[in-house]
Amino acid sequence: MKTNIATIPGEFIREELEERGWTQRDLAYILGWSDPEVNMILSGKRNISPTLAKELGNAFDVPAELFVNLQRAYDLSQAKEPDSGIAKRARIQSVYPVREMIKRGWIQDTDPGMLDAQMARFFMVKNLSEVPHLRYAAKKPGDYKEEIAPKQLTWLFRVFQIAGVLNVPPYSEEELRKFLSTLRYLMVDPDDIRQVPGMLKECGVRFVVVEFLPGAKIDGVCFWLDEKSPVIGMSLWRDRIDNFWFTLHHEIEHVLRKHSVLRPIIDEELSGGLDDTLPEEERIANHAAADRCVPIKLLDDFLLRKQPFVSERDVLAFAKVHQIHPGIVVGQIHARTKDFRFLSRYLVKIRDIVIPNANVDGWGNMYPVEL
């Protein structure tokens, strides 16, 4: 049998009729059709449906799939060439969260050529092939990643863009350490969190909040624009008072120890615990953050005395005596015991307190940055 996928299926049927010594009228008789009906198939004026393919298969004693494939191949050969931009958009979207970036106004929804240029400009390179695959420490327990995931990289660059246009005083380590000594007094009433962005600015720390990207479970990031310009970024994806304070203290420790001078450190899914399997700089930052949230020795002594039956009354009394919001205490107890249901109602939301007082991009607001 001869086949030519660039021609109508009727051509194949004509060749088959010739090989068998049949006429169109013979085929009409076999199929139980009229001569004009057969002619429509042979001339390509009627497509071969699955039902017809089975009938022709029976007539010529071949698989029905042959006629289905002939029709499909012909239809495909006649189809218009697709928009060349489809492949380019698919290539970019398969790596980067393009639709989310358009939705947030980080880039414009334009033709594929301009999209490529916009993406390169967003990542501050000449073309997308030059996007840096930064090394960073991922803080998922037991996990140490060597390359930053594209969604996390995209989020990081947005923090970088915003931090770069902020006007803040010169960084002072002395002022930041003084700020730490006053933070304890802000950890009782959630409303006092509104003071944090302004106080960090006075220390010369650029504090940026960028809404988390779906699937990029980032708590925070620390990096330096230059040796005098530290940046702390937060996503607030876990909208809880305990996570806010632990992440903030964690990133401040990175700044004080200059862990992130050479490379950004992205912290994902910070547990608030003291995991010995993490890199040293993370163990140091975790220990400092836990101790500043709830002094480790005090919490150890408390749990030693009260476990295995720690009551709500015990926790509230402990928080009151040590001037800490109960939610922060509960968060540290969760990190130690892994019982995440215990008094979880005290993990109050703080996002709406932070957003009006910080440099924020997301949740319906776009920070004005010229790319």
Image (cartoon, helix red, strand yellow):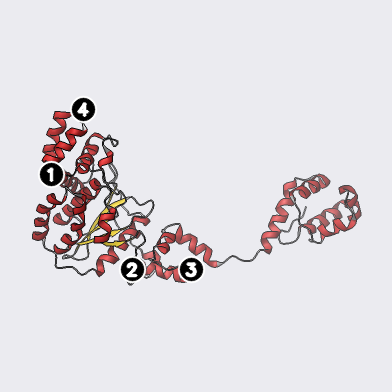
Residue 265 visible in this rendered orientation of the protein: no
Q: Which residue is mark 4?
A: 309
Q: Nearer the viewer, residue 11 or 150?
A: 150
Looking at the rendered structure, the kind of residue marked 2 is Met
Crowding at dot 2, Cα within 10 Å, few <14 / some 14-19 / many 20+, comes out as some
Q: Amino acid at mark 4?
A: Phe
Judging from the image, what secondary structure is the residue with disc 2 in? loop
Q: Is residue 327 visible?
A: yes
Name the side, left or right, on which 114 lies relative to 267: right
Other-residue count near label 3 (Cα within 10 Å), few / some / many at <14 / 14–19 / ≥20: some
Residue assigned mark 2 = 124
* Kind of residue indicated by mark 1: Gln
Residue 98 in percent (x, y) is at 43, 61
Looking at the picture, does residue 296 appear above or below residue 206? above
Residue 2 in percent (x, y) is at 76, 55
- Dot 1 or dot 3, earlier in sequence: 3
Q: Which residue is mark 1?
A: 323
Q: Are marks 4 and 1 in contact (CB under 8 Å)?
A: no
Q: Mark 2 vs mark 1: which is more N-terminal?
A: 2
The residue at the point 71 percent across, 61 percent down is 6
Residue 177 lies in quadrant:
bottom left
Tell me the SS state at disc 4.
loop
Name the residue beneath numbered marker 3. Answer: 112
Question: Which circle's residue, 2 or 3, is located before the other in the chain?
Answer: 3
- Secondary structure of the residue carrying tag 1 is loop
Q: CA distance from mark 2 to mark 1?
A: 46 Å
